[in-house]
Amino acid sequence: MKSQDIILETLLVGPLDVNCYIVGSKKERTAVAIDAGGNEEDVLQCLKKHNLTLQYLLNTHAHFDHVGGVKHLQDKTGAKFLIHQEEKALISSLSSQTRSFGMPSFPTPTIDRFLTDNEEIAIGSEKLKVLHTPGHSPGCVCFLIDDVVFTGDTLFAGSIGRTDLYGGSYEGLLTSIKKRLFTLGDQVVVYPGHGPSSTIGEEKRHNPFFKHE
C-alpha cells in the first residue's frame, strides 16, 4: 500500500479460513474490519496491538463464514456493521446457512447501515471506496483504498467466486469483475476473501476464467 499512514493486517478466521482484514489509520488510530468471520479475540488483540479503535465492521457479503464474528465485535467495541442492502436476506438466513453446511450457529448481527455503490468511507485521511460487484451473491461489494482492493469472494488469485448459492449469477460475476475490477490499474493489489493475494494485472493476464477474453 502506497500510503504510509495506513496499517494493514490480515487475520485467518473462522471455520473456512476467511481472510479478515484490519485497515487502520496511524494518525487517527481508527480502523475498520473487513469480513470478520470469526476468531474475535484475535481481532481484538490486533486492534489492541496497534492501539486502534474499531469504527466499522464492513462485509463484502453475508455468507456465514464471513459474518461469524460480527455480532461479538459489535457488542465488544460498539462498531457499526455495514453491508449492502441486497445482502439483507442472507443476514436473515444465517441459521439456515450454517445448518446447511453442518456448522454451529452464531448470533445474528444487527445491520446499522447499508452500503451504497461508490460511497466513500473515511479511514483517517484515506478513503475506502465501495464497489458493488454482484455475482457471487446479489449484494457483493469490493473495497478499494489507495492501490489495494479487497475483493471478498468475487475474485481470487487464479479463480473467481462460486455462483451456485442464493442469488448467484455466473454471467453477473464475470461482468462485475470485468467492468469494476479489471478497469483498475494493473498494479492494484488484490486481497481476496480466501487464499493468497494477487494483482489486477496478474488476474487479467492469467486467470483461467478470462483466458479467452
Image (spheres, grey):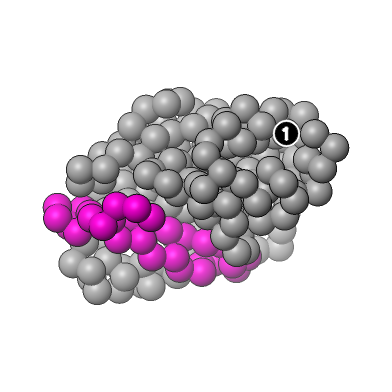
What's the residue at 69%, 43% (across, down)?
204
Q: Quadrant of the C terminus?
A: top right
For the image, the number of numbered tags is 1
Q: Position of residue 166 (x, y in %)?
A: 71, 37
Look at the image and say whether residue 49 sits in the magenta stretch: no
**Residue farthest to the left, as pictured:** 28
Q: Please tell me which residue lies in front, 196 or 106.
A: 196
Amino acid identity at mark 1: Leu
* 96 to the left or right of 10: right
| Residue 70, x across and y down, in percent | 41, 54
Residue holding disc 1: 174
Which residue is rendered at x = 67% and y = 48% of the image? Answer: 203
For the N terminus, the image quarter is bottom left
Q: Is residue 75 above or below residue 186?
A: below
Q: Residue furthest right?
A: 212
**Residue visible at 31% across and 70% down?**
46
| Residue 159: x %, y % from top left | 73, 51
Instruction: State the residue at coordinates (37%, 44%).
Output: 146
Answer with left or right where residue 130 lies relative to residue 177.
left
- Residue 63 visible? The answer is no
Q: State yes or no: residue 6 in magenta.
A: yes
- Could you say whether the residue bearing mark 1 is in a helix, strand or loop? helix
The answer to whether residue 52 is above or below residue 133 is: below
Residue 147: % across, % down: 42, 46
Task: Bin the neighbour count of mark 1 within 10 Å (Cα to Cα): few under 14, some 14-19, many 20 and up.
Answer: many
Q: Is residue 110 left or right of residue 179?
A: left
Q: Which residues are magenta?
A: 1-30
Q: Is residue 195 visible?
A: yes
